[in-house]
Image: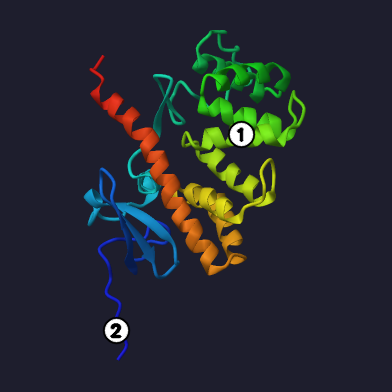
Amino acid sequence: MAETEQPSPIRCPICGSRRVRLSARQSHRRPVDIYRCTKCNRHFEEAAANRGKPFALGGIVIGVLAAIAIGGILAVTMNGGESESIASADLPSVMEPNSPAPEASTDKVSQYQRGLHFWTLGDYREAFPWFKSSADMGHREARYYLGLAYLYGRATIQNYRLAFEQMEASARQNHLDAQHRLGLMYRDDIGVAKNREQAYVWLNIAASRGHEVATQDRDKLAAGMSTDEIARAQDGTMKELANLRAVAAPKIAEISAAPAQ
């Protein structure tokens, strides 16, 4: 008689199924288990401290996916001693067309904001030097936009190698769109030798954080990969996630230890 699959207390964050099996265990500062959903055949992480909690729907799904993907809430990263968050009110992704340009300053956040203002207006020539200066100081958003400028030749000579370097740097600082873009560059031989396994790694990371287009791109890529390639890419995903945690953990600890203002 065939063994009946028992429902798991863990839900798959992709499809919501309880047909979940433990795939592997990893030893980190905070224990992390790797699960596989037998319904959608996706792998995901579940922090040991969060086992048994009900599956969240609606607006908090993206936050849960981010926590699963990188072993903690890594929306905040630290660069050069300054906190940066994609969702932060002082780091807008869109500027009002009629708003005045942010005041020029020497800090990387202000320079990024000024570059974003001109980029939104389509004034790439004015935006480029501000993004370049901010990116040189390690600002992940500026690195992403600078990568786009090199990729499409906006206000600069098109240079795929430099585009790849900026996208990789931003992706390793946990920028979601840069992680998706980096996967596409590995997939399409843009600025780097074509590598389907590395493409899968970065698309998988972005997908596990809730990036819908990355999920589609990953699944299309996987359809043409062998079982061994996918297995190696899954291992590569776990290694990159561990690297992201290692980079972010000291900064998060620094934020937690900082005295209240």
- Residue 137 x %, y %: 52, 19
- Residue 154 x %, y %: 73, 27
Looking at the rendered image, the quarter that the C terminus falls into is: top left
| Residue 230 appears in the picture as rendered | yes
Ranked by sequence position, the earlier of labels 1 and 2 is: 2
The single residue placed furthest to the right in the displayed view is: 157
- Which residue is at a point 27% across and 67% down the rendered structure image? 8
The single residue placed furthest to the bottom in the displayed view is: 1
Mark-to-mark CA distance, 1 and 2: 50 Å
What's the mark number on residue 165? Answer: 1
What's the mark number on residue 3? Answer: 2
Task: Give, as a three-letter code, the residue at label 1.
Answer: Glu
Q: Is residue 181 left or right of residue 4?
A: right
Task: Give, as a three-letter code, the residue at label 2.
Answer: Glu
Report crowding for label 1: few under 14, some 14 to 19, many 20 or more residues within 10 A (C-alpha): some
Judge depth for marks 1 and 2 and give the one in front: 1
The residue lying toward the viewer, choosing from 229 and 127, is: 229
In the rendered image of this protein, does residue 166 appear above or below residue 100?
Answer: below
- Which residue is at a point 46% across and 48% down the rendered structure image? 210
- Residue 79 x %, y %: 44, 24
